[in-house]
Image (cartoon, helix red, strand yellow):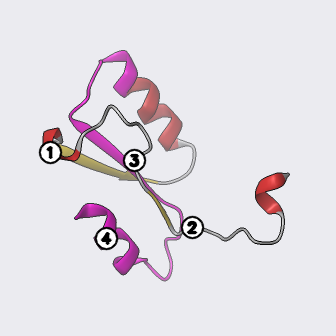
Amino acid sequence: MSEFVSGTEFKRVLPESDSSIKPEKCKKVVLCSGQVYYDLLAERAKNKRTDVAIVRVEQLAPFPFNSLSAQLK
């Protein structure tokens, strides 16, 4: 419930949150939304991949080009 109180905001793009995923080592960035994120996290952990970043796009329309561009840099 604390995430829904005043002073919070909707985030259009949620960046990679795993600190073991280093930008300089990434070979791929996977964009996803919703429940698929948790399936991808499980597969990445199962395969012990540290070269794939997962970025969540939470707003599809209008597409958040600026927010996503900032994350991809």
Name the kind of residue labelled 1 in the image: Glu
* Label 1 Cα crowd, 10 Å radius (few <14 / some 14-19 / many 20+): few
Kind of element beneath mark 4 = helix
Q: Residue at x 56, y 50 (%)?
A: 34
Residue under numbered circle 1: 24
Q: Residue 50: x, y in percent?
A: 25, 29
Mark 1 vs 4: CB contact within 8 A: no
Name the kind of residue labelled 4 in the image: Ala
Considering depth in this image, is 43 or 7 the residue closer to the camera?
A: 7
Residue under numbered circle 2: 11
From the viewer's perspective, tell me whether residue 16 is left or right of residue 69.
right
Measured Cα–Cα span from mark 2 to mark 1: 25 Å
* Label 3 Cα crowd, 10 Å radius (few <14 / some 14-19 / many 20+): some
Residue under numbered circle 4: 70
Q: Residue at x 39, y 47 (%)?
A: 16
Q: Quarter holding the C terminus? A: bottom left
Q: Residue at x 35, y 69 (%)?
A: 68
Q: Residue 14: x, y in percent?
A: 48, 57
Kind of element beneath mark 1 = helix
Which stretch is magenta?
44-73
Mark 1 vs 3: CB contact within 8 A: no
Q: How many marks?
A: 4
* Label 2 Cα crowd, 10 Å radius (few <14 / some 14-19 / many 20+): few
Name the kind of residue labelled 2 in the image: Lys
Q: Earlier in the sequence, mark 2 or mark 1?
A: 2
Reply above or below: 10 against 28: below
Kind of element beneath mark 2 = loop
Q: Residue 63: x, y in percent?
A: 43, 78
- Is 70 contained in the magenta span? yes
Reply above or below: 21 against 23: above
